[in-house]
Amino acid sequence: MPKRTELKRILVIGSGPIVIGQACEFDYSGTQACKALRSEGLEVILVNSNPATIMTDPETADRTYIEPLTVSAVEQIIARERPDALLPTVGGQTALNLAVDLAEAGVLEKYGVALIGASIQAIKLAEDRLLFKDAMRSIGLAVPESSVVKSMDEAMVVADRIGYPLIIRPSFTMGGVGGGIAYNVEEFRTICERGLKLSPVHEVLVEESVIGWKEFELEVMRDHADNFVVICSIENIDPMGVHTGDSITVAPALTLTDKEYQRMRDAGRRIIRRIGVETGGSNIQFAINPADGRMVAIEMNPRVSRSSALASKATGFPIAKIAAKLALGYTLDEIPNDITRLTPASFEPTIDYVVVKVPRWAFEKFPQADRTLTTQMKSVGEAMAIGRTFKEAFLKAFRSLELGASGRLLGQRVSEEDDVSLQQALGIPTERRMWAVFRALERGWSLEEIHRLTKIDPWFLTQFQQIVELARSAEAVGARDLSDDLLRDLKRAGFADADVARLAGMDEASLRERRREIGLTTVYKRIDTCAAEFESFTPYMYGTFEQQCEADPTSRPKVLILGSGPNRIGQGIEFDYCCCHAAFALRDEGYETIMVNCNPETVSTDYDTVDRLYFEPLTFEDVMAIIDRERSAGGEVSCVVQYGGQTPLKLALPLQNAGVRILGTSPDSIDLAEDRDRFSKLLWELGIPQAASGTATSPEEAVEVAGTIGFPVVVRPSYVLGGRAMAIVYDTAALDRYMRFAVQASPEHPILIDKFLEDATEIDVDALADASGGVIIGGIMEHIEQAGIHSGDSSCVVPPFQLSAAHIATIRDYGRRIARALNVVGLMNAQFAIKDDVVYVLEVNPRASRTVPYLSKATGVPLAKIAAQLMVGRTLADLGLTSDLEVRGSFVKSPVFPFVRFPGVDTLLGPEMKSTGEVMGAAESFGSAFAKAMMGAGQHLPQSGTAFISVNNRDKAAAVPIARDLARLGFSLMATRGTAAYLRAHGIQADIVFKINEGRPHVGDELLNRKIVLVINTPLGRDSFFDDKTVRSVAMLQGVPAITTLTGAAAAVSAIEAIRHEGLTVKSLQEYHAR
Amino acid sequence: MDAVLALENGTVFRGKAAGAAGETGGEVVFNTSMTGYQEVLTDPSYAGQIVTMTAPEIGNYGVTAADVESRGVQVAGFIIREQSAIASNWRADGTLREYLVAQNVVAISDVDTRALTRLLRSSGVMRGIIATGRVVPEELVEKARALPNMEGADLVRTVTCQEPFVYTPPADDDFGVVPSRAGKRRLRVAAYDLGMKYNILRRFAAHGCDVTVYPAGTPAATLLETKPDGVFFSNGPGDPAVLDYVIANARTVIESGVPTFGICLGHQVFGLALGARTYKLKFGHRGGNHPVKELRTGKIEITSQNHGFAVDPATLPPEIEVTHLNLYDGTVEGLRHTNRPVFCVQYHPEAAPGPHDADYLFAQFLDAMERR
């Protein structure tokens, strides 16, 4: 059957900012889809609000719109571009929901846009839980008993009928937001009320609990000729009750007989047919009662998903790419399998290894958050590992989390918890449950007891027990008596050298030497979709300890690019973007490119991105083993460490000490910039001002240092990313508390103390420098929030919107001089603050920064790509870059926060980074760009209504012009007593409203009654903390923009004004960059 | 206990004993199914073969009496990467290791089965020996070289039933696929047991057929005398070309005009009976993921496969139509006689292990029998 030849232009919708539940996997799938469509000669129009993606690179699509993912913006794009069809299945739930909205608004019909990949009917059937259940019953499949309710009264009736525990799932929310498990009526009320509120259709499903049942997923595909294949089966080690995104999962399913598996496969086929996904991939979840094998269908996603990205990486079968081709009318047998080349895609991958995925959470950033894992996803990233056995894959996955050797699961002899709390830690799943399982095994608890509490399948528990026993043997024999056989068993079971060395009491270097002597070294096997039945042409590899190595390295000059590992707050897609660009650039420069990474969501771990891909943990042992192997064929190996964030940087010095050539800026320069004393000395020599600072290794010393500098001060541990444990303290008592409870200071890990430049304007700068001393400034990005808020959490704009020309010139000058002084070759990020007309340097990082992709999109110059060229000897002059980069238009980057996932956590911003992702707003004016950024971030600025203002005393004066502007724009104002009095005194009318603890109706009531459409609330200090926090939380849950800084408020006002006067128009990157 | 796998080309793999102690020899082949090791172990088509599973974790769900495909284990030996210490499944009767020991099957674990598979893929299947305990590998290599070749071996005699019997289906078949249809009346099938998998019988029963099973050497006339609605030729082990007595019976049955269906070895026997030739594949097809295209509809089935020989399409007479092709390597997967009610497939519509995509072939046989 030929492809659908009537299709010429396709609109692809991306997934927007990285949020919990939607991360890099949709950049991976979206990019694949765009490439696949273009390779078929189609024109691709792309819309995505997230600039930190490969898919929004101007080269990925014919027209790239970085615009808010709203009906109005996309309608404008459709009107301009007139695509023939819309592909909504590669941009997660966001794209699917937006496609439904566009259809319901009549936009698709109006412009004659066909929906390909999934029909509206199929989307609804899969998404609407009630329709889904009916559909399942109609094809003879069992489902958990349930009812959909629209009110609390209905909910209570259903709860009585089904009985506890109960699962509550709000309709049409992403990643299960607002859902949960209720064991009693009280919990049920709380979760139901929240769910009804969060559901856009005010509807929740109340469902029979199948908690503790075994949980499985199938990744399936179907073409228009009704051919059906299962790409991968996935088993969740954490049984039902924990969201699959929060579960440790394994592929393939390991505890199903063929009879059970084939029954599930048959069900998968019936489901995709019944739901009516005519072409493409779907994810289907099943639960099986371990006692009697009863199987129920749980849910189905008629699109590519996080699990399909995992399945693609786990099998080597590129689901998104194939899905895009199927949408064009190909059948599976018409598409070749990339890896084997000779066989078609109409087959089911078979794998001869085991894949384990482990989530990574960020609860340390949200101390007040409830850590219980439920049906609502809470993790921010994941690591995947591949091994020949489950044990090997499992231990590799844990060491990929970068929590220390094997994630410190093993041999933690000292454990404080008593048996009761250990029981609790096993019974109530949190992010620490696997650690509890290992503690219990180490204490000799029986598998039956652990199974009773966790419901984890005994097969997995047996594997864990074997790991514990192996660890115990290593510990028992010690280094001297460690036999070759035991060492071999340990390594084959996935133990890191660091684990073995610690357990046996020896150092890692001598262990490595010992291994070399007995020939126990890592070999590499290929991921080939077919368990070696056919030859593979794609060097996609994982390390293991076996007889035969298939790495087959070449003698070409090669560059190893170290990726950034699992996503976490502060280290996410931006770094993956940079790593991919390094690969693209260096491939063009004639090097063989080799990627090492362990994050299955990413574009960097697509075997198409590089010449050779090693899916391995980013530890010294694992990376060095790859380098040794790659060197064995004679090709010189260099390493790029400055693109993957903190993860590869930590390896820079050890690698250099091991004789590996590090490309670009030297590890010593990186250290110079990180080392407080060395860096201060450098700035002093350069005559560049820096805020007063010092370091402390004890609480006493800290108080002394702060005394000299003067409060307020910013305190933080050295060598961290994302402002981990960073705080602003205003007095000695707070400083003492911080030193004693928040951090562990020591001579090796001093605490950095800086003078806090209150109310200063902050600026980020990214610069490019070459080995011959050439430096250009890529952009000067002015923060919209004042200093004190982590740069990753601040909105920023390029070009700067209120800096003086003199300050800009000073910043350029400082940037250039610092880059030269540090001998930067490649990228450098510097942060500046301007206070009282003085430009201070806050910090400098000679490496890729979070702003590189955003700035690349704004300038049209691929900074990361150029920096990689500079690292291998090109000069800026060679590349025709002789002056600082300019932008045309205004480009605002705004952060997106996960607060809605963590009820009870304050939404207030501070020096510790909390955002998970970002959006970009582009327009001709700052106001419009900011408005678009707010929209993209899901903050819908109102055009009229009542604004609530409550600010602290320091902010009162500055709040006046903002209030005046709002009044001028026709807003009514509501304020708390103090603020209202101040405003009235300045001639601005404002109604008084009670604070939450003052009486009713209070501001919370007004928010709930939807009277307030905008909240401007700056923190009032410790005493009113609870009050403020409640207001912000209520506003968040109601979807009312809550702005916590006055600079942010001023920007919001200009945005409201811009929308009113300019309206919103759309424009593609290609148009912005046209010269 | 240590164990060694020695191949005729001199390659030696060291591992651990994973079943009975002792020594065994056979043709070493690989199977790429990720589930269904028990069905593989008990499939009579593997007689004389040592099977390695490419999936590394084997034994996880133990063994269960309900999942056997014949009286007991049929493979000559078993090679795996990692053996489960426990059986974790509500249906399990015991662990794989206990089962292998009880059935006296020599097995080896901790082998780099991927390296072995790559070797078999590039050099073709070869003879090998598994031996446990203290052994001299060079001697084992010599023994492997002395083993008989699969080509020219009649292994059907070793696996076929001794006496005819009437098949009685199990009382409940929880995991049986609901057939697309059952016979409009009870249909009587006479089946040649060339090493038949139980699931073929279960599928016939599910489709409303009463099956009488005959030893491979039974003259065709004996079956035809019973006036069956259809005759079936089963799967089985070894080289089809040497089965002259089966081929002769097939010719008689085909000429009789009785609807006839064949699977796997049965398919190869039909090819030979109709005048075509068979040849040995380099490393065979064994697994559950091969795409097969039904040429008339263009539909693709994911199939269960287990064969080392194939029918050469160039040698087929004109009245024989190729109905199915393997999309991996273009080999013949199905044949149909254009003027007699005779058809057959190389792969396994009965699955066990493997996907159920081809179950429609049983209904197709019902059609042929009912038309008569």
Image (cartoon, grey):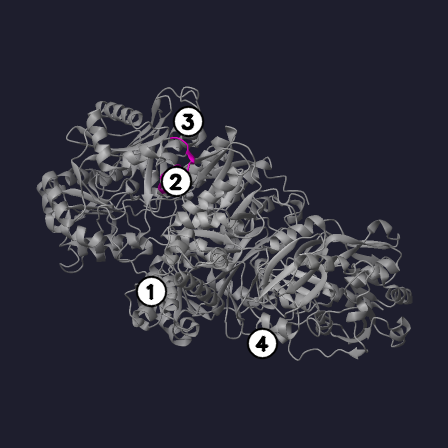
Residue at mark 3 to residue at mark 4: CA–CA distance: 65 Å
**Where residue B93 is drawn, which disc sits there?**
4
Task: Name the residue tied to disc 1.
Answer: A191
Residue B147 position in % (x across, y down):
76, 60
Specify few, some or many for label 2: CA neighbours under 10 Å numbering under 14, 14-19, or 20 or more: many
User: What is the distance, in whole Å, between disc 1 and disc 4 at their CAs?
Assistant: 43 Å
Residue under numbered circle 2: A574
Chain ID of residue with mark 1: A
The chain that hosts pointer 3 is A
Residue A993 screen position, x and y as percent: 16, 53
Q: Number of callouts in the render?
A: 4
Q: Residue furthest left?
A: A985
Q: Look at the numbered discs 4 and 2 and tell me whether their residues touch, using CB distance below 8 Å.
A: no
Labelled disc at residue A356? none
According to the picture, the residue beneath numbered tag 3 turns out to be A870
Label 4 packing within 10 angstroms: few (<14), some (14-19), many (20+): some
Q: Amino acid at mark 1?
A: Ile
Q: CA distance from mark 3 to mark 2?
A: 20 Å
